[in-house]
Image (cartoon, coloured by chain):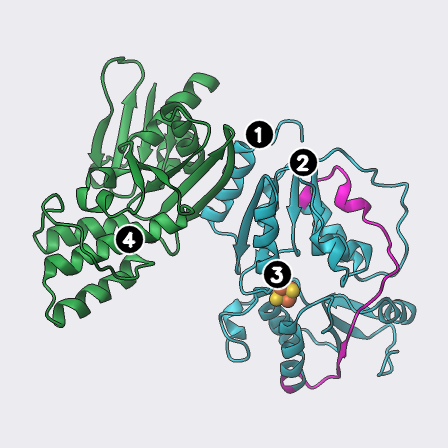
Chain colours: A green, B cyan
Amino acid sequence: MILADFGTSYCKFLDLSSPGKGPVLTPTKDIPRDLRVDLATGHNGKRFSEHYVNELTALARGGEELIDEDEYVLLDCGSRDIKFVAYRNGELADMGWNVECGASMGFTIELLERYYNLDYDQLPVPDRTFSVTCGVLGMSHIFDAVSSGISEAESVARFVKGIALNAFRFAGLPDTLYLSGGLCDNKLFTQSFPCRLVPLGRFVLLKGLEKIAEERF
Amino acid sequence: MAHTPLNKNSRVGIVGIPPLDIIRHLNAVGAAIFDLDEPIVKVDIETAAPHLPRVYCAILRTAVINALHLDLDAIYIDVGPGKCDCALHVSTIFKDIVSIPVYPCRNTDTSAYGYPLSRTRMSLMEKFQKITRGVQSAKPYDLQKNAPCKPVAGFWGVPPRDFSLFELFPDRTHVYGWTRCMENKTPADTALESYFNPEVPTVFFSQSFCAKTALAKFLAAKHPKGLYLDIDVGCSSSAKAKIQAFLELSGVPYDLG
Ligand code: SF4
């Protein structure tokens, strides 16, 4: 049984019939149009599968598997959206999904690294930040800052920190935040959060699908 | 109560819920009633842009389009505590853009009709269709019909512009908020509007740019299992996914209906 999380920039696959073989990551642009999987989630998932699981449900189920606590907040930062689930007493207490204002944040962060030829692992967390609610609008802050003489690296770092703070507020300002998604590997981003951060990596939704597959099939 | 001679050939638009005296009069003369809050005329909502800002309640943008395109003889618009200030300002605009009498009114009716549909087992879509249609009549309800059921989910709020989100709810969803007041024929009853059932997972809905967003958000935070949601013109796929995940993760049993 093949499970897949079809994201905007990357797709993640897990073959349950090959235990021991871990998940596989593939850029979305390389996915053949006629690909079919057994159970899918993610932005593009419906096109590639008969059985589709809502992204928030997959995130929540993945969190239940990976987080051994009764109270927690789990935030997923994707290429085009941000979403979170908050649990209290082992039950869902709050949730949110921001596609409109969270638009393109992850995508923009990746784009900027390549455009300005930066390495996020080497950039220090800046003291100052931009107020960023949307990736696209945030770009204009960078251009303004660069034209006012601030270095490209510092401007981008302020932008990345602004995105982290915005995501933190969206998740309800928790003391500890579990993070899901590709941005877990971005040191500048993860260190920009003003709380304890626990990165869970980019396969949390896939873990959720695994749990759902066990329950349903 | 009525200001202009109306008869069975008259076509009258209503916005919000005019007082029962007006509805009784319209029913007595046999006038056809058009609920301008609903999308009746199928034209792009952007055609309301010359008259109302784009960032404005989609229900009232819809009412403007209906008023412009339906061949009406008069409009009654509730501008009192049973509706909102947005409607008050739209009544001023109506007077400028249509050449028929526009009668602002204030519904402060307190005679409670009951709200059997809000609590019965029926598809949420059908429930809302019946409740909103009920505005056009002053007849008391047959309270023997539509027995109450035990709820598994709740929907709080005004009737949305886009009913498609109701497909996601089970039949045993109880209706709260202004829609319950609407069925009860007491649209200004803020105590009834603020009531919710903490036992059932509830979606607290408001139209975007409506003052009720504040109450919806406040009550959702008070409710042990509440989801706040505001939607503008149409229900996006992410809004639907949010509702679906909320109900699913709150353990709402779909299969039980
Ligand atoms: S949804 Fe709110 S703003 Fe719109 S008409 Fe109703 S009460 Fe007024």
For marks 4 and 1, give the CA distance: 33 Å
Please provide the residue range marked out in magenta.
Answer: B96-124
Q: Residues within 10 Å of mark 3 (few under 14, many from 20)?
A: some
Q: Is residue B47 magenta?
A: no
> Same chain for marks 2 and 1?
yes
Relative to A157, B243 lies left or right: right
Q: Which of B71 and A209 is in front in this view?
A: A209
Q: Earlier in the sequence, mark 1 or mark 3?
A: 3
Residue B218 visible, this angle: yes
Query: Which is closer to the viewer, label 2 or label 1?
Result: 2
Give the label on residue B212, or none: 3
Figure disc tally:
4
**Picture quadrant where residue B224 is located:** top right
For marks 3 and 2, give the CA distance: 23 Å
> Could you tell me if the residues under marks 4 and 2 are in contact, i.e. CB atoms within 8 Å?
no
Label 3 marks which chain's residue? B
Relative to B95, B113 lies left or right: right
The residue tagged 2 is B199
Label 2 marks which chain's residue? B
> Could you tell me if the residues under marks 4 and 1 are in contact, i.e. CB atoms within 8 Å?
no
> Same chain for marks 4 and 1?
no
**Type of amino acid at the residue the image marks with label 4:** Ile
The residue tagged 1 is B251
